[in-house]
Amino acid sequence: MNGWDIRGSAASERWFSVLKGVSVRLTKGLWERVSLGCGIALLGASSLVWASGVHANPLNHDPLVREAYEHFYNLDYPGAVERFEHFRAEHPGDPQATALLLNAVVFQELYRLDMLDTTFYANDGFLTGRHATTEDPKTRDRILGLAEEAVREADWRLGKNPNDIDALYARGWTRSLKCTYVAMVERAYGAGFRLATKAKDDEVRVLALDPEYVDAKLVAGIYEYVVGALPWPFKLLIGFAGITGSKAHGLEMLNDAANRGGITRVEARTVIALFLRREARYKEAIEEVRTLKDLYPRDFLFWLEEANLRKDDGEGMRAVAAYQEILIKSAKPGYFAEARLELAYFGLGDALRGQRHFGEAAKAYEDAAWTKNVGPELKIRSLLAAGECRDANGEREAAVKDYQGAIAAGPETSRADTARKHLRNAYRGN
């Protein structure tokens, strides 16, 4: 789909209350896209490289921070969390130290939940459907606790100096990380939108005080792009609420962050690739991802994203080969810190299905579903897709078994509803 289309959303009727002055709130569709946009945008790692003249928090230069990020880059989240915990202990009360730890904890949890595969967000089914996500209460409490503490630490410093740029930046980054969690895991889009707006406001304030604090352009640029990508009728409506955005300006900010940012270079390239993908500009997105993959050749997610993009670009068996190469690399001890093989198997299933190799696709989907520690949402998606491929291949008995497995894995989900329909009537698509 091109853009962030919210046409047809029942919640769009709420705009009439906006125009009447009853309340200044956004439609559910806009809540979803802005909060989710900020969340997905942070799926990458951070690159600790500074361009000449660019300003950033001096703590980002600390050798322990660099060492922690090396583990983060390679998806060794336990190693990163351990080092950021030590760094925070050395800098009590500093919101940037707390935000660094929060960043690692949030993405460790998203990776555990199989939520760092961008195919999950490539269409609006993520936004509108009912899903199975097993939220860990202890991790949730830790994430929310760290976020509250970082904001409190930043507020204390801002109370003493309202123009404390490092504190403003840390607060905005913290709010965007909390937005990432509540939008992607809890799907609390109203809260996510409010956090995204506050995060953007903080980063815009940073840039007003110091235009060379380039890292602040990440969150501000995402917000600009997402709002600017809405259809014109909705942009006109939200303009009455004082909400504006520009795709061109958003991309300009993101490109600056990608080229000159201190700790946001990789995030900026990651989100540029995501936006290019949503605009079906797959070859440009592939080039962005290959740049990241060259920088961090043992980052499993960059390998996966290149394969995903080749699949979406219609490269057929070349995409199949890309997924198979990931599985081969993963078999080498220590090549990836923690490869989530279920994501590669699922992508392989999609690629094979696109080539009408239904039997092989079903097997790949089933491998994804039964991989150890697979997240519940991906398990349901995999078994439903496997059943459809079995039906397409004339294997009704095997299809029924897969549909039953999908229902058992998430009986209250939208995909379970689809599986029940296929139990009544065999799937006839491809």
Image: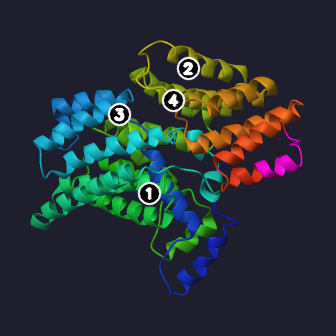
Identity of the residue drawn at 70% across and 50% down: 415
> Which secondary structure, mark 3?
helix
Confirm or deny contact between disc 2 and disc 1 (CB under 8 A): no
The amino acid type, in three-letter code, at marker 3 is Tyr
- Which of disc 4 and disc 3 is earlier in sequence? 3
Give the labeled residue for mark 1: 182
Number of the label disc, if any, that sits on residue 77: 3
Identity of the residue drawn at 55% across and 34% down: 285
Give the labeled residue for mark 2: 326
The percent coordinates of residue 248 (x first, y second) are 49, 51
27 with respect to 53 (left or right): right
User: Please, is residue 264 above or below residue 36 in the view?
Assistant: above
Q: Residues within 10 Å of mark 2 (few under 14, many from 20)?
A: many
The percent coordinates of residue 83 (x first, y second) are 22, 33
165 within the magenta span: no
- Which of disc 1 and disc 2 is earlier in sequence? 1
The residue range painted magenta reads 419-429
User: Please, is residue 21 above or below residue 332 in the view?
Assistant: below
246 with respect to 140 (left or right): right
| Separation of residues labelled 2 and 1 (CA atoms) | 30 Å
| Separation of residues labelled 2 and 4 (CA atoms) | 10 Å
- Which of disc 1 and disc 4 is earlier in sequence? 1
